[in-house]
Image: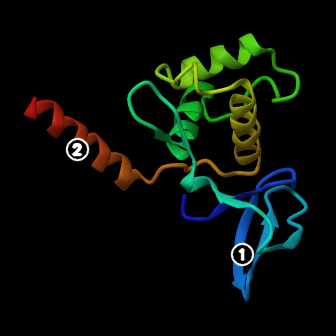
Amino acid sequence: MKEVILSIAGKPGLFRLVAQGNNNLIVETIDAQKKRTIAGTRERVTSLNDVCMYTEEEDKPLMEIFESCKQVTGGKATEFTHKDATNEQLVEFMAAAVPTFDRDRVHMSDIRKLVQWYNILITNGYTDFVDAEETAEAVAEEATEEAAE
């Protein structure tokens, strides 16, 4: 994903970075309204590219998790929302997308947030989570490691 997608603590939804100002960020909501606002230095801003999820092997970047979710749902939003999903639905969805997710360290609230963010991105046309070049490099690297063993 070429654009910088952000989460701002205390504000619902996701934001796209538009520009950087002096000690602040100009962001735009990822929805139909495209409302612009300023994120100041006191706000806790997190780039989705910097977020990882615990798995039984090593931490997996969130964008790769979104790509796995896209494969499970066929590129569509989930059939349930983060609000109306049962814990069983969430665990089943997560197990289908990332079978090796760490069930002890990944909480229900984490999975709910994942589903919420995934649905926001898919609904608003963000479908390229991992660059094709990065995916090809990762597959080649994995094959090299397996051959070395």
Residue 143, position in %: x, y? 19, 36
Precedes in sequence: disc 2 or disc 1: 1
Q: Determine crowd level at label 2: few under 14, some 14-19, many 20+ residues with C-alpha closer than 10 A.
A: few
Give the image quarter of residue 112: top right
Residue 108, position in %: x, y? 72, 24
Q: What residue occupies the far bottom of the structure in this picture?
A: 22
If the image is split into quadrants, where does the C terminus sit? top left
Give the image quarter of residue 76: top right
Q: Is residue 140 left or right of residue 22?
A: left
Q: Is residue 77 visible?
A: no
Judging depth in this view, the residue of 15 and 22 nearest the camera is 22
- The image's mark for residue 5 is none
Judging depth in this view, the residue of 31 and 20 nearest the camera is 20
Helix, strand or loop under label 2: helix
- The image's mark for residue 141 is 2
Residue 73, position in %: x, y? 63, 27
Q: Determine crowd level at label 1: few under 14, some 14-19, many 20+ residues with C-alpha closer than 10 A.
A: some
If the image is split into quadrants, where does the N terminus sit? bottom right
Q: Is residue 106 left or right of residue 99?
A: right
Give the image quarter of residue 97: top right
Q: Is residue 3 visible?
A: yes
- The image's mark for residue 18 is 1
Q: What residue type is disc 2 on?
A: Glu
